[in-house]
Amino acid sequence: MIDHLPALQVVIPLIAAPLSALFRPGRAVWLLAMTACGLSLLIAILLLNQVLTQHVISYPMGSWPAPWGIEYRIDAANAFMLLIVSGIGTIVMAFARPIVEQRIRLPEYKQPWFYTAYLLCLTGLLGIVITGDAFNVFVFLEISSLSSYALISLGRDRRALTASYQYLIMGTIGATFILIGIGLLYVMTGTLNMMDLAERIPAVADTRTIRAAFAFLTIGVSLKLALFPLHLWLPNAYAYAPSAVTAFLAATATKVAVYVLLRFFFTIFGVNFSFETMRLDLVLLPLALVGIFSASVVAIFQNNVKRMLAYSSVAQIGYMILGISLVSVTGVTAAISHLFNHALMKGALFMALGCISFRIGTVQLDRIAGVGRAMPWTMGAFVVGGLSLIGVPLTAGFVSKWYLIVGALEKSWWPVAVLVLVTSLLAVIYIWRVVEAAYFKPAPEGRVVHEAPLALLIPTWTLVLANLYFGLDTSLNAGVARTAAEMLLSVGH
Amino acid sequence: MRQYPIPRLVTKLLLPLILLFALYVQFHGDYGPGGGFQAGVIFGAGFILYALIYGLDEARRILPPWLLRIGVSLGVLIYAGVGVTGLLLGGNYLDYGVLDSHDPVHGQHLGILLVELGVGITVSAVMVTIFYAFAGRGR
Amino acid sequence: MQILGLYNYWIFIVLMMCGFYVVISRGNLVKKLVGLNIFQTSVFILYISMGKIIGGTAPIAVDQDVVYSNPIPHVLILTAIVVGIATTSLGLALVVRINEAYGTIEEDEIHAQSEEEAL
């Protein structure tokens, strides 16, 4: 069975999704979904272990050999991504049950459909990461996107509907651009297999078609990963979605899009074409810098904490793109490592917010006054997550910021390194606004708030502790990231 | 639509032909153009026509929502189940060749037939579900 | 003549731009979806054009050698068509819900109501 792990990675959530639609609401359907998530996490760990100790795994679907059939191809970069997606998927699923039962806009008999959509979204995200076939990326991208539109629209606020609609329009445009890009590549090369594409593109690279394909893919993927200034769908979608959905999507969906960017530009087009012929770094670098700075500033002025963190996500994506645009092993290591660390910290922060809104029904700054004393564990989780977001030493967030600054200094780009530090200070300001409101403002009179239930606190604190653990032991988030970065950068040469 | 006998009669005449054509497209998909997607849409369209002419309640009596709910899941499960059967028989996921131990070509025919059947069931159930969901809104 | 000979690609570009323009310029949520549909459909033409060989027949296995069109783009685009159906129906379902929640499907009116709510 060990040989079939790549297929099972995607198939287990795929089977669990329609099965859970047949269940009655209650604990059983959650257990089924939880089991599926847990199994896919287990498989991801085994696969990462296999890739690190042995070699690249190639799995031909239906025994049709690549490049004719669809190939699942796992190397250090996507094994690492599989771990992130399935890990966050499992922890948020553990968190989701009380949210589904009390905080989403669904009649009770339809609650199992939440798990169906969630598992389909997980299937799609895992599929994007694991596949070695360019068209397959589009298919899985749409599976995950369509289910995430449905998940976002479940928020209690009616603005969740418009946010979801806006995301649907933007997301579909992005996906269609990707589809056009893949089509143009197919016209020129006659293949869809990523490795095969990488071999055949150099011969035809100097054509308008390939350059157009490159442009379409860049815009399409940038829309999906919410690169400034294509991020407009993100703040509303994250702010009004149910908190479990926000935690899951914020920690995985945009990360997977960043992975697609890495895969297309480093593996398929190759470093030479992407960064020396097309000079993509000259486009990404300013967008990343402006994005980091402006989104951090906007975050300071938000009064809805979820929306604040959504803008912070746009800034964090900027850090990843900044790392990529350095086009050095250290820079790409920083980007990949930040994929992991940001998933941990944003997951923890949004889950802490989920605990707060579970108890008081809102996350407006003026309404969370005094929550710090009423919900010490929840706010404790928020503070640690916030420290990690800022990049304080001994937290996971420090690791990737460190690599980013080292990468910038290697190129002697002093202003970039300074900007990274300055924007970290901006993060201090917006996190402080929340801490101030929760701890130093008196609670409104007559309001009795209890600590969040353990079912919510345990998953939240699991991620918080992971933030601390990976701040100390960096063999996974920096070591594996470095292996992946070296692999990505050497493929193109 | 009760007072218009011609559409009602024409529907009654056409409906078996539409459903039969859907089955033809479904099972002839091995040898000619066709397959589960197309057949599912034709099958679904037949029911939607029936619901348009005879009313939603009548259509719901024949094809109740709980049955559709099972159909939507069942199709995907048939598809995934065929893939897993391939796994259990020693091939890769979705390897149809191992489904028949004597002749891989037979196995491939069987495999694609079952997978397309799953696709057909899901697509027709989804089409009718979408129609019910929109038509039943705001009543 | 070469430019005219590639007419299906021109149709693709014109349709794509029409669809894109409708998505951007219209404030009515249903019209936006119509634009999005045209936009997606244009890509189907791109894919089908690139599989077509002049004089080629349908790719069905027969005994003698025949010129046939490349079936792979057709299969790919079948998937994209299904994705398009799913997107459209999900989008329309959202529009129905938005109409129930806001009583309108005009973007600016919805925006105005949301602004009031935020204050």
Image (cartoon, rainbow, N blue to C red):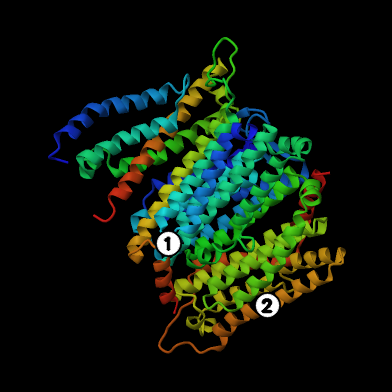
| Residue type, numbered disc 1 | Leu
| Residue type, numbered disc 2 | Leu
Q: Position of residue A389 (x, y in %)?
A: 67, 71
Q: Quadrant of the C terminus of chain C?
A: bottom left
Q: Position of residue B13 (x, y in %)?
A: 22, 26
Q: Which of disc 2 and disc 1 is earlier in sequence?
A: 1
Q: Position of residue B112 (x, y in %)?
A: 50, 26
Task: Determine whether, in the image, residue B23 is placed left or right of residue A97.
Answer: left
Relative to A435, residue A278 above or below: above
Res A480 → quadrant: bottom right
Identify the residue at the far top of this view: C64
**Label 2's element?**
helix
Q: Is residue A276 visible?
A: yes
Q: CA distance from mark 1 to mark 2?
A: 31 Å
What number is the disc on residue B33? none
**Which residue in the protein does label 2 denote?**
A426
Relative to A104, residue A214 above or below: above
- Which chain is home to disc 2? A
Along the viewing direction, whichever of C106 and A349 lies nearer the viewer: C106
Along the viewing direction, whichever of B22 and A355 lies nearer the viewer: B22
Q: Quadrant of the N terminus of chain C?
A: top right
Task: Determine whether, in the image, residue A389 is placed left or right of residue B105.
Answer: right
What number is the disc on residue A161? 1
Task: Determine whether, in the image, residue A349 is placed left or right of residue A207.
Answer: left
